[in-house]
Image (cartoon, helix red, strand yellow):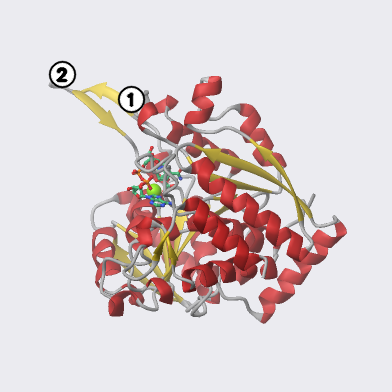
Amino acid sequence: MNTHAQTLNTNALKRSEKRVFLKSSNSNRRRSSRGAALAAASNKNYKLTLLPGDGIGPEIMKVAVDVLNEVGRKHEITFTYEEKLVGGAAIDAFGTPLPEDTLECCKQSDAVLLAAIGGYKWDTLEANMRPERGLLGLRAGMEVFANLRPAVVLPQLADASSLKKDIVSGTDIMVVRELTGGIYFGEPKGFGTNAKGERIGFNTMVYSESEVDRIAKVAFEIAQKRGGRLCSVEKSNVLEVSQLWKERVIKQHENYKDVELSHMYIDNCAMQVIRDPKQFDTIVTGNIFGDIISDAASMLTGSIGMLPSAAVGSSGPGLYEPVHGSAPDIAGQDKANPLAQVLSAAMLLRYQFGEEAAAKSIEEAVNATLDQGFRTGDIMQEGMKLVGCTQMQEALMKNLSK
Ligand SMILES: NC(=O)c1ccc[n+]([C@@H]2O[C@H](COP(=O)([O-])OP(=O)(O)OC[C@H]3O[C@@H](n4cnc5c(N)ncnc54)[C@H](O)[C@@H]3O)[C@@H](O)[C@H]2O)c1
Ligand SMILES: CC(C)[C@H](C(=O)O)[C@@H](O)C(=O)O
Ligand SMILES: [Mg+2]
């Protein structure tokens, strides 16, 4: 078990080469070999908690685990897995979306791989009992405040986007989303009655200075190692919470003068990401704005089924999960695109353990599979081979074992 792994390996966060998701560098290789040395000292056996969750979750998790095992065989890494319930599956089994045992197991592991939670079945439960609350509790409980959501347009899929090829080609954006604060966690919240006797629902968007400072620091460090440009996205023309956000980001900039800082309102950013995505390098934003902007950015890449993510804190295990949800509309039909899940496993290997070579093996297998024309429905293009989740897995495994 590797308990010393560098949680936030920002050296691995460079802008992408044309055909891989994230670029490595000499310094990254140095960090990677440190990670590898640490792993070697502990027989390269990593303890992972697996959270398949709901909907397409178990289907895509199976693919990621098979891929991890194969890549482990090639790179002399073994994984010990412990599978736990979260979300709707945990509600059904234990009456709670985040059993204590699940959170404890996650905290005791070296890293956590999550698929997705949620579904129609649990949509009418009260807010506190919903599957989504399990996910929020997990993020807060693991203290993974920085969510890295890369949106990279692969050349093979430049035609798969609903936008024009020349607009999206070459896009390489890193969205750094604050994950454990903002309106998702602010108090007070709830339901009440107003002066007219009408029912009201309310939430509070709140950020403290230290919460903004730490996410800004992560984002500046990432931008420094990528294209050197950071765009802070908020709504400071209207919201006090965003005014504080902007002030603290400007203050933090004093420590990163080599990074070019810009500011954009979230509404304009939603438009600019679609109009001219290549203007962005690294984006830093709050919890809800990051949720929305990363889904919008996913469509540049062809499908939300392509977007992986890493949620990390200042130490301890990270939480690696696709950006998409449990896709209940296609669950159980062998239609899910497993690539976001598989690429989340690659992020886990790179950021948690510095296993750069193993992460690259996965990304290269994804590239090769796309080069061979295999496409799930969400990224299907004319002349390509339409496959389901299982056939996509078979193609990936063949490429991995080469
Ligand atoms: N991290 C998470 O676990 C997470 C993230 C988002 C939504 N959710 C939950 O998932 C449920 C469904 O939410 P939603 O429909 O708004 O979002 P969603 O991301 O699950 O699905 C949106 C659309 O994208 C498609 N899609 C998503 N992932 C895909 C994949 N891998 N391959 C092919 N197509 C894919 C779906 O079929 C659907 O048409 C809700 O309960 C929601 O709260 C969970
Ligand atoms: C399911 C939900 C709680 C979650 C979020 O809003 O963070 C999801 O949309 C995501 O993007 O991971
Ligand atoms: Mg979302």
Of the two numbered discs 1 and 2 on the same chain, state the one appearing first in sequence: 1
Q: Secondary structure at mark 1?
A: loop
Mark 2 element type: loop
Rate crowding at label 2 as few (under 14), some (14 to 19) or many (20 or more) other CA atoms within 10 Å.
Answer: few
User: Which picture quadrant has residue 307?
Assistant: bottom left
Rendering coords of residue 197 (x, y %): 15, 18
Q: Is residue 181 above or below residue 314?
A: above
Q: Residue at x 33, y 35 (%)?
A: 203
Q: Residue at x 28, y 64 (%)?
A: 269
Residue 129 shows up from this direction = yes
Viewer-side residue, 53 vs 198? 53
Residue occupied by mark 2: 197
Given residues 258 and 362, the one toward you in this image is 362
For residue 358, which quarter of the picture? bottom right
Given the image, on which type of amino acid does mark 2 rest?
A: Gly
Tell whether 133 sits left or right of 295: right
Number of marks in the image? 2
Q: Which mark is residue 170?
A: none
Q: Position of residue 131 (x, y in %)?
A: 45, 32
Q: CA distance from mark 1 to mark 2?
A: 24 Å
| Percent coordinates x, y for residue 170 in the rendering | 39, 78
Q: Which residue is mark 1?
A: 124
